[in-house]
Amino acid sequence: MTRGGARTTTGHVAPGRQRPSTDPTPEHADTAGPAGSVGSVDPVRAAWTEYLAAARQLDGVRRDAATAAGEQARSVQAAREELTAVRTRLASQEARLRERGVPPISLVPTPPELTEAARAMAGGPAAVLAALRAARGRADAADATLSARGLPRLAAWPPRLRNLLVYGPLALLVPAIQVALFVATGTGAASVAALVCGLPMPAVAFVAGWIGVGRLFPPPTEGRVERTARLGALVCLVPAVLVSAGLLLAMLAG
């Protein structure tokens, strides 16, 4: 029998109904899982990550550019100050050289020298600053030579060697006097007095040498005098000790 037009015979489907499919994978099933599941990508999160990376990179570039600009500005300022100082030094040296009879044409740079200087400063403010500092060093050496009072050749000697010419005679002066008194008077009171008075003389000779080095070999502008204090103390002490010991042994033996 039929009821409402529906057939109840086994194996037939009533109109308006569909038999449930037993296929576990429907033909039109959505292969993309829900947001946050494995294998899915959130486009908003990906875009935000790319934006943060680009922003960090841009900030690093901006910082590097600001640092480079600051260093360049400092180099330019330092180069300007160095140029002013070098010009002042060169003007003073030019006047002093002219007073000593140097012809003016010898004080003007030649075209090859100008070309070499321009090539050395073609690397930007840092290269210009380095070239100006090198020129200032040469100006210091020239000042040291010009300032040497009658000793221009000695001013170019190594500091130890030229200072030895000052400390040495002072260190030998008192021992020479002691030896002369001993030879003249023997083991008398004069020799004993000279020996006793000669004990503090190394310190006096060292102080005199210290002052003499500063006077004979003045430093360049804003520089220091190379006095070689250890060498001076050693030179002043050794002769006095040796002569005093020899005289004392001679007096005891006599």
Image (cartoon, rainbow, N blue to C red):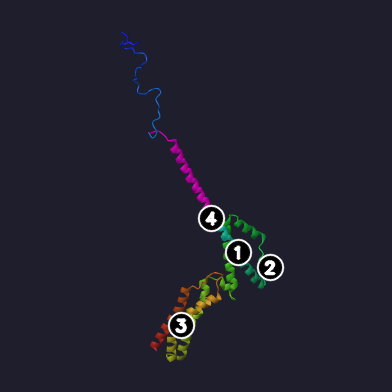
Residue holding disc 1: 84
Question: Crowdedness of circle 1 by 10 Å Cα count: few (<14), some, many (20+)?
Answer: few
Mark closest to the chain's N terminus, 1 or 2? 1
Inspect the image, locate mark 2, and give the three-letter code of the amino acid beneath it. Answer: Pro
Inspect the image, locate mark 1, and give the three-letter code of the amino acid beneath it. Answer: Thr
Query: Residue 104's mark?
Result: 2
Classify residue 37 as left or right of residue 231. left
Classify residue 136 as left or right of residue 179. right
At horizontal 50% and vertical 78% (from top left) the residue drawn is 209
Inspect the image, locate mark 3, and give the three-letter code of the amino acid beneath it. Answer: Met
Q: Position of residue 97 (x, y in %)?
A: 65, 71
Q: Nearer the viewer, mark 3 or mark 1?
A: 1
Q: Which part of the image, by quadrant, shows the C terminus?
A: bottom left
Question: Crowdedness of circle 4 by 10 Å Cα count: few (<14), some, many (20+)?
Answer: few
Q: Which part of the image, by quadrant, shows the N terminus?
A: top left
Q: Secondary structure at mark 3?
A: helix
Is residue 163 part of the magenta span, yes or no? Answer: no
Q: Which residues are magenta?
A: 38-66
Q: Quadrant of residue 194?
A: bottom left
Query: Residue 70's mark?
Result: 4
* Mark 4 and mark 3: Cα distance apart in space: 58 Å
Q: Is residue 188 visible?
A: no
Classify residue 50 as left or right of residue 126. left
